[in-house]
Amino acid sequence: MIEGVKVKKLKVIPDERGRLMEILRSDDEIFIKFGQVYITTAYPGVVKAWHYHQKQIDNITVLKGMAKIVLYDPRSESSTKNEINEFFIGIHNPSLIQIPNGVYHGFKCISQEEAIIVNIPTEVYNREKPDEYRIDPYKNDIPYDWARKDG
């Protein structure tokens, strides 16, 4: 596991009315602070990658569909420099992934329906000076192939 990455297995509580799932609580061991909450989506097969933050820490879960969330650690001071982590989360594996600042991350919708992702970052998005540093999902120095791995 990349240094600083944390995973919280989420518990779905169903009853005859529907279901409930807590995502992140202020009394959770992994809670740092609240910036905002937003959703993003991806259609089947779409890759949204790569970016990192200098200050912000992301807390990501998938509410609908399934997504492959991939992390890459380029941090020179990290004990896990150049390590890659893959997480398959969503309706069949409800989990929260906490992504430390400085770690590249992205995701691919791997379900046959749109994936709906919720992020609870530690910082408010600054439209004038975003804490977001992007590179192309395919043409870069990250040793990762977004293609499906059959077999």
Image (cartoon, rainbow, N blue to C red):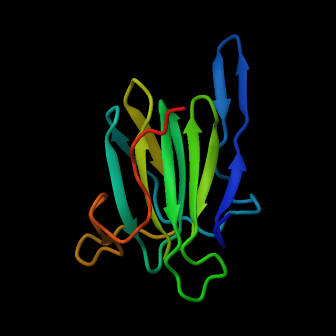
Q: Nearer the viewer, residue 133 or 81?
A: 81
Task: Tell which residue pokes out farthest to the front in this image.
Answer: 151
Residue at x 22%, y 76% (from the top left corner): 128
Residue at x 40%, y 44% (from the top left corner): 108
**Relative to 44, is 17 on the left or the right?**
right
**Relative to 43, is 59 on the left or the right?**
right
Q: Is residue 110 above or below residue 97?
A: above
Q: Nearer the viewer, residue 105 or 151?
A: 151
Q: Residue 114's quadrant in the figure?
A: top left
On the image, the x and y values in percent for residue 52 come to 41, 70
Task: Tell which residue pokes out farthest to the left in this image.
Answer: 128
On the image, the x and y values in percent for residue 65 come to 47, 30
**Relative to 73, is 95 on the left or the right?**
right
Q: Nearer the viewer, residue 73 or 11?
A: 73
Quarter of the picture holding the N terminus:
bottom right
User: Total label count?
Assistant: 0
Residue at x 75%, y 59% (from the top left corner): 27
On the image, the x and y values in percent for residue 23 come to 63, 45
Task: Tell which residue pokes out farthest to the top in this image.
Answer: 16
